[in-house]
Image: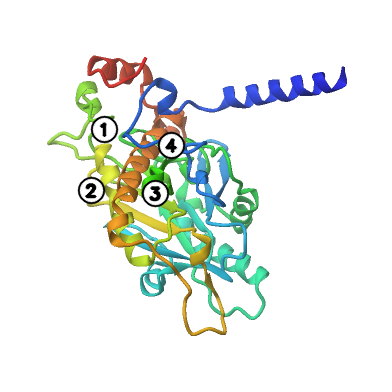
Amino acid sequence: MLVPRILLVVFLLNALYASSQNKRIRDYGIEIGVLKTGKYNAITDVDGVKVGHTTLINGDSIRTGVTAILPHSGDIFQSKVPAAIYIGNGFGKLSGYSQVKELGNIETPIVLTNTLSVPVVSEALITYTLNANENVRSVNAIVGETNDGWLNDIRGRHVKSEHVLEAIEKAKGGLVEEGNVGAGTGTICFQYKGGIGTSSRIIPEDFGGYTVGVLVQSNFGGVLEINGTPIAKELNNYPSQFKYDVDGSCMMVVMTDAPLDARNLERLAKRAIMGLAKTGGIASNGSGDYVIAVSTAKENRIPHSSDSLFYGTRVLRNEAITPLFLATIEATEEAILNSLFAAESMTGRDGHTINSIPTNKVLDILRKYNKIRD
C-alpha cells in the first residue's frame, strides 16, 4: 500500500503546484496565431534553455529582482552561441551590445534586472565567468533592464551579486514562473501590472520542425489590443491628447534551435518588435525596446579557442526563415499577454498601487468580438 500512497501524495502535490500558478491567456480560451506551442508554451521548449528568477519583495518599497536565461547547460564562455541584438527604441541601458554586434555571439547567460542594477549584475556575471574559467581577461556580460522605479525603491539599488548568482544557480527547464517574479517584479504594462511572460511556437516539420521560444520583461505602454480586439478603447484606458503616459521598456529574449547565424538572428529579432506592436505597444520616446536573439543549435556553437582556422557551421538558407519570423511574432505577442494575465496587483514605493488587468471585463469584451473560445 506504500507505493499507491506515495503516488497519491505526488499527484496531490502536482495538482497543488498547478493550481498555484497564475493563469495564462490560453487558460481562458484565448489563442494567439496559428502555429502550435511547445509542451510548456515557454522559452524552455527550446532544448537546453533554462530560466531562473530571484525575486526581491521586502518591506513597503523593495519590488525588484533578477531573471537569468541560459542558452545551454555548459560553459557558455567556452562554448559561445550565435546571437544578435536589435534595438526597436534605444532609451535603455543594455550592456554588451557592441561586442555582440561586432562578433555575432554571446558568452554569458542573459540576465534581466532594473535600470540602476545593470552595473552590479554585469559585475556578478564577470565573477561567474571568471570563477569557471582560469586565465580569462575579458568578459562581455549581457544585461538587459527596464525601469521599475514607480513601485520599487530603484535608487536603493537592492540587487546584489548574490541575487544574480542565485538566479543562475536556480535556472531550470520546464515550466517558467511568470508575472510578478524576477526582473518583472515591479514592472508596469499598459497601465496594468506587467512582469515576466513567455511563450513558444513550433514550425511544421516540412519547414524544419524548429522551435522558437520568447521571454519578455514587460514594462511599456500603448493602446492594448488582444487578438486584434481594441481592449484599451473598450475600457477607455489609453493615452489621450492631454497625457501620453506610455514610457517604459520591453526586454525580449528570443531563443531558437534553428541553425541561424547572427545576420539572420537579427532579422528574427526585428520580428519580435512586430509582436510587441500587435499588442498595442508603440515604442514611445522613453521606451527601451530591445530584442536579444540566440540560436542554440549544437552544431553551430562557437568554441572559445580552436586549432582550426574555420568555423564548421551550417545555417539555414534565407528562403527557409519565413516560418521562423511568424513563430517569433506569435510567441512575442503571447508572451507579453501572458505577462499581463499572470501578474497580480501590487503596492510598492510611497504607497503606489498598480492593479492587475481586469480579467473578467477583458473576457467579456473578447466574447463580444467573438475572439475567445469558451
Residue 358 drawn at (x, y percent): 36, 21
| Residue in front for this viewpoint, 183 or 15 | 15
Residue displayed at 21% across by 24% down: 236
| Residue in front for this viewpoint, 288 or 213 | 213
Q: Determine which residue is flagged by label 1.
A: 224
Check the image and report above or below for 216 versus 237.
below
Is residue 138 at least partly visible in the picture?
yes
| Residue in front for this viewpoint, 287 or 321 | 321
Mark 1 residue element: loop
Q: Earlier in the sequence, mark 3 or mark 4?
A: 4
Q: CA distance from mark 3 to mark 1?
A: 20 Å
Q: Earlier in the sequence, mark 2 or mark 1?
A: 1
Residue 338 drawn at (x, y percent): 41, 33
Q: Amino acid at mark 3?
A: Asn
Q: Please, which residue is most extreme toward the right here? A: 1
Q: Amino acid at mark 2?
A: Ser
Residue 37 numbered tag: 4
